[in-house]
Every structure is written in C-alpha cells, then in structure tokens.
C-alpha cells in the first residue's frame, strides 16, 4: 500500500462525500484531485479488477447499462460508471468509491463506458480484459476535430490494451480495420441484413477505403456507412462476424424481434426498443459478454430483458397526450429516428424538436443539415422547435420543405408542456443531450415522475 | 429576360468534402431559387464524376477530412491540362461565382504546409496560402463581409487548424468581429477574388446569411441572364436565427 495511494484515496473519497453533502452531483472533481496526488492512482485501483471498456461514437451508454445489468442479474460483483461520467477523472472516482483507503477493490468486475478522447489514458491505467468499439460517426466535431481523428483516438486506446480481447463492429469499415493493426484477439459482431424497408439516404462518413482510397461497394446497408462493405481495389471487406443479428423477425412501433447468432447458437430475442442502433447495441453487448467469457444463454437473456428508458423511446402521458421522447446526438442517430417516423403506423404523430448547443451537445449545430429532415417534411407540415438553438432548428425545417407558417418556436418549456397537453394527437419529441435532460426534468416535475437516473 | 430561368450548381466533391453540414449551402441555394421560380439543378462533381464546366453557373466546395483531401488531389489533377483543377481556374477567371468553405477554401489556394512541414501544392486559383498551426481555431464567429454589397454581417462557426494568409493586394471577404478568421492574427476573414467567395465559416453559412446566398445567386443569374433581378423573399425566420446568434456573440 503506497503512501501516495492512501493520500489520493483520502482526497478522492472526502471530496466525493463533501460534494454529496453539498447536494452537488459532480463525479469528476474527486478523481481529478486524486490523480494530481497520485498519477498512478487509477492503475492501482484497477489492479485485480476484470474490466470491460466500451467506447465509440454511438451506443456506448446504453450498451454499458445492458452489460452491467446482465452481470448483476448473474449475481456477479460488478459496477459501472452509472453517472455517465466517462472521462478519466470520473472513471477514477467510480473506482475509488468502490475501493478501500489502501486502494484495494471491493468489486471483481467493472464495466466502463469511456470517451474516445480519454481512451488512451484510461486503457493504460485499467488494462482492460475486453474492449468493445461500437462505431465511429461524426459527432461533436468541434471537440475532437474530425472523424478519422476519432478513429486514431480509439487506436491509441487499443494500443494501450495489450491483453484485451477486442469486440469490433464488422459493419463499420473504420472500426473493423483496427483488427489488422494489432495482434489482439478479436470478436467481430454485426448485422447480416437490411433493417428498414424504407430508409433515408444517409451521408456516409466512410465512402472510400481506409486502406487504399478506392470507393467501397456494398452488398447491403443497414444505415449510414454500416453494412456489407467491400473494396473493389484492395479487397478489404466486411469480416465474417462471430456474433450476428441474422434477420429482423418483426418490427413494431415500440420494439422489435430479431434472430441472434453466436457461432452456431441461435436465439430469437425481443427488444423493447425499435431503432437500428438499438439492434447494433444488442449485438455488441452479446459480443462483449462472449469475450468476457459469460454463457451465451445469459447474454441472449440480458438483451431481451433490458428495459430501456431515459430518453430512449421513453413515453410520458401529458394530460392525455402520449409523448415519446427520443435522443438525437448526431446525423446518423437522427436519421434513424427519421426512419422510425417514416415507418411509424400512427400517421398523425406530431413532432417537436429541441436543439441545444451546450458543451456536452457540441457547440456546432451544423450537423442538423446532414440529417435527412426532408423525408419528414414531405409528410409533416407542422412542428414546434425549442431549445437554445430553436431558431436554427426551425430554419433547418424550413429549408427541408416545411412551410414557415407551420413552424412554431417555443423556447419556454412550461409553455411547451402546456401546449403538448392540449394536443389531440400523439407527439414524438426529438431532443439532443442537454435538451433531453432539461425537457425530461421539466416533465418530471410537472408530472411528478421519480428521479430520472434509474440506470 | 427568360421566364423559366435555370441555373446549374456544380457541387465539387460532395463525396469527400462533406463535413459540418456544408451541404446546407446547396440546399439553401436551391430553395431560394425555387421560391423565385428559378430551377436550380445540382450537379455532383465528386471523384470520378465530371461535367462540361461551361454549363456550370456556380461552383460550391465544402470542407472535409485530412484523409480525404489527399485522395481528391488525384482527381483534381493539378497542373494537368484539361483537368478539373485547370478548368475550375479558367471558370474563376471568367467570373463564374464560387463558394468555397474551409477545406475547399484552402484547396483553391496555392498550397498547404502540414504539421510535419510537408507542403501540398493546391490549385492556386486564388492568392492565398495556408500553414497548419498548433491549436485548432474553433467556435462561433461573426464577421463583416466588407467585400460584398452593403457589407452584411455574417454569423457562422469555424473549425480549422490551418492559418491562411492573403497575398499582398488580395481583398479579404471581411473583417472579423468575433472569432479567429483566416489566421487569428490579422483580423481578416476569407477572400473575395473575382466572384469567388471563400470563407472558414460553416454553420452552414448560407441559411442564416440570406444576403450572402442571394449575392451568389445574383452573380450566377446575371452572367446567364443579363439584367435579371432577384425578387425579395420573406426572410423573417432567417434573420431571426441570424440575430439570435449575433446577439449572443456581440
């Protein structure tokens, strides 16, 4: 037990308690201070803990929850970064509050969602046993620079994980290419078929071969640049996945049924969420648990049983109006919501778009022009826009073909909730991250919902 | 003046230079034409795609990733007679309007020197050159477009590591009010060269800056249909979005 470790623990734990006493959330500060005291603090805390790390642009929060809940259901002593703090400071705090003053862990397993930019340092410290990469999409570009930089950030984390089994998305040409650059064991996962009968054209983030620059050909596309890619020039192609969603058995407004395969074991699985990215989350969770050496039946059960929520197709009843809340983060995710709305049986479904530009959202909102709102505006002639960048959202809808007269700007959430309650049709609210949190909190206080981090 | 006016927009490298919602600019040009009964067709000029440049009334080139910028050099064929690069240069000299954003702006310039000291020679159609800087210059920006009729205020978002400098005598598109601009030092933003408007401003640029959009349409229209006028549109929502950002920044 090192003196520095003890000092770091005291600083971390006391700051954490103090923040709680002051009723302040904040999980970053304690870890930040502790790492100042002992730069190797996280290395010490993670020693002896089997760690599964998840990273990538989309799906890491949800997938982390599903894996963690699966482990819990199996009676494993596991923890995860429930607060969603996914930089090294917050992750350090999560480990510290579950360790003794001497830095000895009380848990055997950890499931950690990690920001791509933080991955290099986090992996160096925790030496993951499994590293799951979901996908690489353009997202919050003002923070990271550009898409290939995101891939390089992930690569730096992979290089610091010499003992990890990598779970890579076979359908993402950027993510799959990681396998050829390292010697780690790899479990590929993917979706073997198209997902939507009607689908908007996405702007692809990876049109050209990452290895030779020639334009990819596709056997099929699930969404955006994901699917059965192959390069006609150098032959680089989608690797055969060990874990695959083989077919979509049924599609519903509030969920779907898919057939999953691991090697030759198959299972029909019901999901309580309907979007294409939910189907990918499901495949990546099963791959992660496979690489973590847990029984397949448990993995199938885990994805089947998981209850989503927290802005992922959550439904509220506001004075008789059924309101569905969906999180949009970037063009790829947003287009999947648009696909859902296009395939929505309820023709009268109304739309509210809430757009913020806080740090956690990305301060550059230009990506809304990369999402295919035109497909929505061909059917819908009315919408309400809210959030700090409501005007930009409204303008996007105007240029997507919605008549100006049908677009209303309503920045006050109380007014918006009142208006929702007066509507005579169902509504889908599409909001980006901080907007979703704000709106949800307002609805919660108006309707008296329980606190919203149920995990 | 023709009743049924038509314009052709050549979108250079929509397959490679497509970050930051820049396609919002072609959407805007098309819509603002359509609302006035002008048919605006967008021709995709991606890698391996071509058209007769004499048919193009307005070129657009957006920003992209470093990785892809090297791939497209091959297709531009800089220095080769009859290549896209040389025909684009000729079109610019013939006063065809061009909107170039960020990466597209840099590529129209003379060269780019990367972090590693490597120099990439670009088209050289406009008198600017770019050198990579240490930090990226990122954030909302405002500039006064002094090179345009009426010096309209422009709001946008910049995100670039390159520092661009104008050759002596070249005219910047505007003066930075808030943000970094060409290089974060001399207060200039973009360039106006003949009818080329080049800028670092994403956002995308045109939806919230209808005066700039209409200036481009006017330049294109009057080359094809001398004396043609642009009727005013109801831009209440456009200016509301413009002013909301302006109010926040200035």
Image (tube, coloured by chain):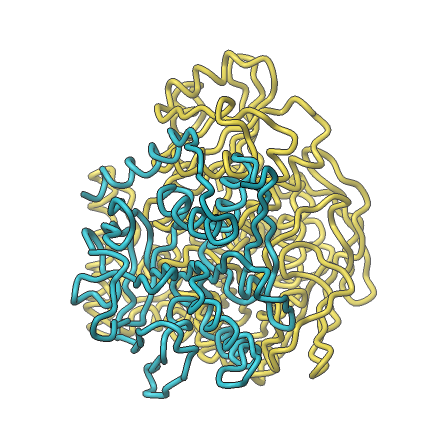
Chain colours: A yellow, B cyan
Image position of A16 (left or right of B237): left
Identify the image quadrant of residue A123: bottom left
Q: Percent from the top left, x then y, of residue A439?
A: 41, 30
| Residue A111 seen in the current view | no
Quarter containing the N terminus of chain A: bottom left
Please determine whether, in this image, residue A450 is positioned above or below residue A395: above
Q: Determine the residue positioned at 53% across, 32% down.
A: A325
Q: Percent from the top left, x then y, of residue A135?
A: 56, 62
Identify the image quadrant of residue A30: bottom left
Front residue of A169/B129: it is B129
Count of numbered circles in the view: 0
Q: Percent from the top left, x then y, of residue A44?
A: 34, 72
Q: Determine the residue positioned at 35% across, 81% down.
A: B114
| Residue B168 seen in the current view | yes
Front residue of A390/B164: it is B164
Please determine whether, in this image, residue A125 is positioned above or below residue A17: below
Identify the image quadrant of residue A414: top left
Image position of A169 (left or right of A22): right
Front residue of A221/A441: it is A221
Front residue of A247/A93: it is A247
Q: Determine the residue positioned at 75% across, 47% down.
A: A269
Image position of A336 (left or right of A109): right
Q: Percent from the top left, x then y, of residue B82?
A: 57, 80
Image position of B220 (left or right of A200): left
């Amino acid at each position: 037990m090192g003196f520095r470790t003890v000092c770091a623990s005291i600083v971390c734990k006391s700051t954490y308690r103090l923040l709680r006493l002051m009723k302040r959330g904040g999980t970053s500060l304690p870890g930040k201070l502790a790492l100042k005291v002992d730069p190797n603090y996280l290395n010490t805390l993670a020693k002896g803990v089997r760690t599964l790390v998840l990273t990538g642009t989309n799906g890491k929060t949800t997938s982390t929850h599903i894996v963690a809940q699966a482990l819990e259901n199996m009676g494993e002593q596991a923890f995860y970064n429930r607060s969603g703090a996914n930089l090294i400071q917050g992750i350090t705090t999560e480990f510290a509050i579950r360790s003794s003053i001497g830095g000895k862990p009380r848990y055997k397993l950890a499931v950690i969602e990690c920001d791509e930019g933080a991955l290099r340092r986090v992996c160096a410290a925790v030496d993951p046993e499994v590293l799951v990469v979901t996908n690489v999409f353009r997202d919050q570009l003002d923070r990271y620079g550009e898409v290939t930089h995101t891939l390089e950030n992930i690569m730096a984390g992979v290089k610091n994980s010499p003992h990890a089994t990598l779970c890579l998305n076979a359908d993402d040409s950027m993510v799959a290419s990681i396998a050829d650059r390292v010697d780690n064991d790899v479990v590929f996962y993917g979706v073997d078929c198209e997902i939507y009968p009607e689908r908007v054209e996405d702007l692809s983030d990876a049109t050209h071969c990452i290895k030779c620059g020639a334009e990819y050909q596709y056997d099929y596309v699930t969404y955006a640049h994901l699917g059965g890619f192959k390069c006609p020039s150098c032959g680089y192609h989608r690797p055969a996945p060990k874990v695959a969603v083989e077919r979509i058995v049924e599609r519903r407004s509030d969920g779907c049924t898919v057939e999953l395969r691991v090697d030759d074991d198959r299972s029909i699985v019901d999901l309580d969420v309907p979007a294409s990215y939910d189907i990918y989350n499901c495949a990546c969770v099963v791959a992660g648990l496979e690489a973590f050496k847990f029984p397949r039946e448990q993995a199938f059960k885990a994805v089947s049983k998981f209850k989503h929520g927290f802005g992922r197709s959550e439904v509220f009843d506001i004075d008789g109006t059924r309101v569905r809340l969906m999180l949009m983060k970037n063009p790829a995710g947003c287009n999947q919501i648009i696909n859902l709305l296009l395939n929505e049986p309820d023709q009268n479904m109304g739309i509210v778009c809430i757009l913020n530009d806080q740090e956690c959202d990305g301060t550059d909102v230009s990506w809304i022009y990369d999402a295919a709102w035109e497909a929505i505006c061909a059917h819908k002639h009315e919408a309400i826009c809210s959030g700090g960048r409501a005007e930009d959202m409204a303008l996007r809808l105007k240029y997507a073909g919605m008549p100006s007269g049908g677009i209303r700007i309503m920045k006050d959430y109380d007014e918006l909730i009142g208006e929702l309650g007066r509507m005579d049709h169902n509504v889908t609210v599409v909001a980006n991250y901080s907007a979703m949190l704000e709106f949800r909190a307002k609805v919660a206080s108006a309707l008296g919902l329980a606190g919203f981090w149920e995990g | 003046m023709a009743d049924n006016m038509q314009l052709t927009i050549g979108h250079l490298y929509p397959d490679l230079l497509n970050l930051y919602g820049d396609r919002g600019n072609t959407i805007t040009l098309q819509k603002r034409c359509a609302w006035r009964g002008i048919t605006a067709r967008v021709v995709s000029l991606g890698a391996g795609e071509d058209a007769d440049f004499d048919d193009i009334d307005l070129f657009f080139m957006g920003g992209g990733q470093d990785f892809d910028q090297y791939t497209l050099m091959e297709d531009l064929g800089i220095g080769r007679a009859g290549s896209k690069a040389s025909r684009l240069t000729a079109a610019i000299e013939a006063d065809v309007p061009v909107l170039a954003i960020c990466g597209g702006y840099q590529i129209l310039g003379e060269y780019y020197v990367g972090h590693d000291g490597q120099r990439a020679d670009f088209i050289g159609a406009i008198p600017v050159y770019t050198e990579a800087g240490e930090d990226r210059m990122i954030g909302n920006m405002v500039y006064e477009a002094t090179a345009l009729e009426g010096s309209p205020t422009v709001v946008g978002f910049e995100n670039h590591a390159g520092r661009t400098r104008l050759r002596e005598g070249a005219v910047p598109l505007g003066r930075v009010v808030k943000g970094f601009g060409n290089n974060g030092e001399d207060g200039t933003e973009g360039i106006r060269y003949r009818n080329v408007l080049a800028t670092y401003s994403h956002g995308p640029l045109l939806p919230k800056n209808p005066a700039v959009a209409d200036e481009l349409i006017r330049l294109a229209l009057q080359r094809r249909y001398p004396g043609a006028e642009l009727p005013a549109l109801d831009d209440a929502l456009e200016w509301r979005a413009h002013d909301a950002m302006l109010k926040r920044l200035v």
